[in-house]
Image (cartoon, coloured by chain):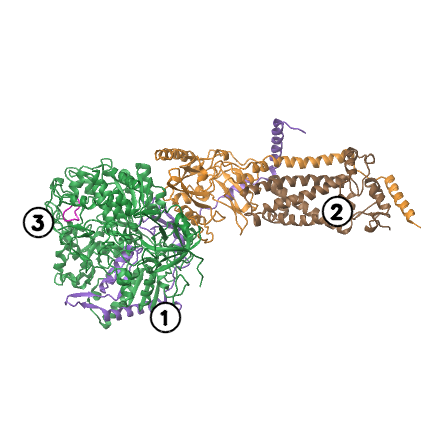
Amino acid sequence: MSRPKNVIIRYSATNRVNHWITAICFVLLVLSGLAMFHPMLFFLSGLFGGGQWMRAAHPWIGIVLLISYLAMIVQFWRENLVHQDDIEWLKQARFIVSNQEERAPQTGRNNAGQKIVFWSMALLIPVLFFTGLLIWEVYFGAATSIPVQRAAVLIHSLAAIAAILVWIVHVFAAIWVRDSVRAMTQGYVTPGWAWRHHRKWLEELASGQHDETNDRKRP
Amino acid sequence: MTNTWQDIKNANVVIVMGGNAAEAHPCGFKWVIEAKIENDAKLVVVDPRFTRTASVADYYAPIRPGTDIAFLNGVIRYLLDKDAIQHEYVRAYTNAGLIVKDGFTFQDGLFSGYNEDTHSYDKSTWDYELGPDGYAKFDDTWQDPHCVINLLKQHVSRYTPEMVSRICGTPQDKFLHVCELIASTSAPDKAMTSLFALGWTQHSVGAQNIRNMAMIQLLLGNIGVAGGGMNALRGHSNIQGLTDVGLLSNQMPGYMNLPNDKETDFDTYMSTRQFKPLRPGQISFYQNTRKLFVSLMKALYGDAATQENNWAYDWLPKLDIPLYDIIKAFEMMNNGQMTGYICQGFNPLQAFPDRGKIRRGLSKLKFLVTMDPLDTETSRFWQDFGPQNPANSAEIQTEVFQLPTTCFAEENGSLVNSARWLQWHWKAADAPGIAMSDIWIMSGIFHRLRELYRKEGGAFPDPILNLTWKYTDPISPDPEDLAKEMNGRALADLTDAATGAVTKAGTLLDGFAQLRDDGTTSSGCWIFCGSFTEKGNQMARRDATDPREQGIAPNWAWAWPANRRILYNRASADPAGKPWNPAKPVISWNGTRWVGIDVPDYTPTLDPSAGASPFIMNDEGLGRLFARKLMVEGPFPEHYEPLESPVENALHPKVQNNPVARVFANDRAAFGSPKNFPYVATTYRLTEHFHFWTKHALINAILQPEEFVEIGEVLAKEKGIEQGGWVKVSSNRGHVVCKAYVTKRIKPLTVDGKPTHVIGVPLHWGFTGQARKGYGANTLTPSVGDANTQTPEFKAFLVNIEKTSAPVAA
Amino acid sequence: MPLTRREFIKFTGLALAASSLGMLGFGESGEAQAAAVRPFKLTRATETRNTCTYCSVACGILIYSMGDRAKNARSNIIHIEGDPDHPVNRGTLCPKGSALLDVVHAPTRLRVPRYRPPGGTEFKDVSWDYALDRIARLMKDDRDKNFIAKNAAGTTVNRWTTVGMLAASASSSETSYLTWKAVRSLGMVVFDNQARV
Amino acid sequence: MSDLQSQDLVRRSASTMTPPSVRSHVEQVAKLIDVSRCIGCKACQAACMEWNDLRPEIGHFEGSYENPADLGPSVWTLMKFAEYENEQGNLEWLIRKDGCMHCEDPGCLKACPAPGAIVQYANGIVDFISDKCIGCGYCVKGCPFDIPRISKQDHKAYKCTLCSDRVAVGQEPACVKACPTGAIMFGSKTTMQEWAGERIVDLKSRGFEQAGLYDPPAVGGTHVMYVLHHADRPSLYSGLPDHPRISPVVEAWKGILKPLALIGVGLAAVVGFFHLIIEGPNEVTDEDEAAGERVLRESESEKSP
């Protein structure tokens, strides 16, 4: 598919690499985590070369995820700041869900849903990391008491489930809102996509508010 | 042990004093637990420390180390006071009613006949008054003030509960409660067993400690009966056997003594050993001594021992002093009086008192030979191992031979256990490397010496050249051949006088009753006679059948003497032959002979009415409350303080210590005073280790890895010592730097009104093997022995303790 | 959605049932059973009856060794446990007895005779002949020099006090008898054992 | 006891199907530790190490007879010593053999995520199948008694097997056989309970009014039981739990959370899927495209000079 003539850069190469490192780590953690969480899914350990490799790899992937996500926070925190509009948008979310986006309030670069995903992960990933450290048997098995570890493992599981749910919403939204995936793979969106989903952002771009970031690219 | 291990389960009271059976003999101790469970027995523990034995006891009482006699004499006083003795037994089976010579006295801590200069007694007054018929005089009514029981009453009258508590530090109520429990076994059908070990022997009054309890057991009628007895829990797997075979400086096989310088000829030697009965109708076993001796000499010298040369009597060495024991040996070494020393499976650098003296002694030898399966400290005394064994190798001129031997798993042979069972064992594998058996090594040395004497001649070669060595394999004799030689054979056709049965020349004998004094029998160890007969190796028997499950198992292995399992078992029945305890009879008289589950310790067909008393190894046939001349410090036990003691002797300050203890001048100079060394120390074993052997075994090193001492919380607080912290324990002879175990199990005792602290010093650590390096408890201990046996006083001495830091590794 | 407790239980029960059904394809129980238990290591090991070398309770022990004593097999002891037939220990062993294997195979077991010359700082391996020849020589020289045939009073005493021996405490009675014979024939009196310690 | 040779599984970690359970008529076994007969000699520890070929490192003296200092991957049983002064002021040395209790309802097995790494045989023994262990340490968190330990060498969990290899061929565990004083007994669970009853009567007659059996019901009972002189206060014995149970946290984690989470996740995915099917994708229309282009163009022209 050839690139349309007039596109807008939504994610830089750095953004995209960072995102996909995060995504791959997250998927690997979900797979290995679920394998250790529920026996029905233990077969997933095969993907990692067996249970021992999986158990050994999981925490290290977690560290990469944390670093990677911290980098994402650095890049994206500003545009995910919550505004009054976001609350309004959430109130009108039924129009979004029923594919009547035009009836919902206009949004900037990110809508409230995206912000929720972003901030949920920003909360959950550190929680997962710290509880994960407490139950990292190889290095920290003796560092805390068993009751603490028990609580940690429960919180870790709960947080993981929450993260997975958030992730499902994220993935679903990416698939449902067509051409979003391309934004994160190839980095650009069409003006129509921006008009439809992030009109305020488009208008901001048009008015040159983001010139210094060179978001707009002309053929 | 007079009884068997399993027989302990028949006891009503088990007293563990002078030992720590649970730790040192766990598998034997199971029978104590069994007594508690199956026989509702009470376990009483008297010990300076709350030991593992105490942890399962029904009653525990503390005691200051080295004061057992005060405690036990107090018990006797209690028993006599409350009349809690088994009257019929005491009257019939002990010397309570025999009358002692007029000159016998006891005053201010000394018995009659003491000689200040020689530190010894003239014991002539320590005996019975004999009548004109040659028999001992007696008073059955116990009225005569000079009969034994009255003398005993008078002797123990000073040991009031107050005095016992003052000396021992045992609270009075605890002492009296123990007395009460002991007294409960004076009923004819109740028994108490006494389990003891080195906690009693390793004192300057060790033998008297044991005698004291034996007297209590006689008063309670507990000797010879099921669940009773004096049970010495021997330490090593065959130390009983080595003692039986006479591997002691003054001994020959079967408890015959070597002659001394005064016994210039064979008849003189025999004259003091074939005891005549002192009571009418009595039998005295030792009248057979000549038969035993001649049979031994025939085993040793065969045809060369003849009537003409007095059965080679002069080929035996004669002793000029009573004992050349180990303490004496190291004294001689230090004085430059010894050239060579051979340590066969023995590690004196670890095992004997005053380690510094041992090391100096070994350094003065020309040569030292060690034979051991393990790399012992003794064999490396010359090597520098830092603070745990400082040595300047270059200055030590001793040649050292370290010979590797097989261990138990790599040879056949028999071991004699504490209950006198001879049990055969079989080889399971070859030894590592080119290690060889002790038999091969001793044979090798002997053959080379014999060859040298044959070739070169030399000092008195006759006994060497004539020693019998008729083994199938002379290079390494089969244990079976040696066992047969000890059992004995007929050397000519023997006809039994009573039955007319003939034993052919060359056949193995069935028992020592067949031995003769005319040179027609041989037996290398008469008490083992019957262990390897024409019927086969009796020691290898494995029939565990146990009639009435009473703990005899008469067909398992073989017990000396004559497969008898309970010594003095005639005393288990009343004078008429009826068992005192009908529920647990051992033997009884059925009208024509003695029958029961054990071999009678008595003539099997001797009618009770003949009047012979049960203790046939004694010439009066009676149990001795009064020891006559057999103990060096007196016929009654008396409390003497240990050579190093924190207090004055409360009974007689002028006679502080055992007045006849043998102390070499150098050793006396090395004693410490309570001023500098205010705490009482006692050494002991831990259950995880066996002496200095198991530190070579990885599992045991894991279970108890490092040297420590045990101290009470009060002392720890006083001295600022932390749990697990480093301490320096010192005596006037040396010091140990190790960890401290601060415990509630050792409490300060109030002795003579003053608080007295006890420090426990486990003894297992050295500088070879798997466990961490340690200084060894014998760095601290004084070189003084029991006056009768020269067993070192390891259980009571003085030390100081202070907080310190870890020793600096070399 | 508010759930009553009853509904809640029903709900999770269904879920459990569903997940159990889903798991059918992945079961490995049979395999686990086969692999579970460690094989019993003594099945055909050679059993030898012996007595514990430590204290004088003299517990009966069973020594298990590799190899069936065939000509080409060299026995190696792999395990030692109590003899259940023995009337005293009835199969039990104390912490020392239970660890006998480790003393048999102790790294400090001696394998070769060693000799340390006067002033030496190390042991060196020697042959048995070297060691025993030298020991016999040293003993004879000293005996010939210091043997006391008669005392001052003229009594034959036949005594040798300058070389002594400490006898073992765990060697067999047969060993000790042979030792006694050899030692006493030399007239040695400084001769003792471990009975006191 | 011949039935003990059957080692059929009744429970298996991380398995959602019922293990083969037809051969259920297997006698339940139990080890009974009679603390009142125990002298703390560590024969059990030695026998355990010898039989199971375990040799932990040689440690240090650390102010107690407890050696090694703790249970470990190669320390499957450990004597614990507590010096306790009772109400009368008398010292009691309470010595307890610590090790796996072989719970009827094992917390370790419940927590284990690796299928078949922890199993319970029909005779009641709970065994770790090291080959399947992934070393996560969940068993440590699941155990109410703080027993399993993870090896730093091979990252696998270890604990007492109750000598399943010996029991499988009809022998008693090594520690049981060694115990010099019979403080450790082994047999069917009912026999052990009966024997414990006799022991408790004896102890009560010796003044231990509170003597009793420790067979905690909250874990379904155990296949290692204690006779205690102070059964009212198990924690006197070096912290034996007074009321052991699988932690509610672990119960929640391994109980309700598991299905709920899967359902939740599954539901979310299903809802999304059907949303897509029903509502269709949120696509950019040509009008949108035109509008977007227009906005860009306008701004372009505004900025053009």
Q: Which residue is mark 1?
A: B395
**At label 2, which amino acid type do we have?**
Phe
In the figure, what tint was chain D given? orange
Badge 1 crowding class, 10 Å Cα cut-off, few under 14, some 14 to 19, many 20 or more, is: few
Question: How many badges with numbers are in the image?
Answer: 3
Q: Position of residue B780 (x, y in %)?
A: 34, 58
Chain at tag 3: B
Please state if A2 lies on the left or on the right of B405 as rendered: right
**Chain colored green:** B
Q: Label 3 vs label 1: CA separation?
A: 64 Å
Please state if B565 lies on the left or on the right of C78 as rendered: left
Please state if B352 lies on the left or on the right of B589 as rendered: right
Chain at tag 2: A
Q: Position of residue B651 (x, y in %)?
A: 23, 49
**Chain colored brown:** A
- Magenta segment, which residues? B614-621
Q: Label 2 vs label 1: CA separation?
A: 82 Å
Q: Which residue is mark 2?
A: A76
Q: Secondary structure at mark 2?
A: helix
Classify residue D209 by image quadrant.
top left
Along the polypeptide, which appears first: circle 3 or circle 1? 3
In the figure, what tint was chain C given? purple
Helix, strand or loop: magenta stretch: loop
Labels 3 and 1 positioned on one and the same chain: yes
Q: Which residue is mark 3?
A: B134
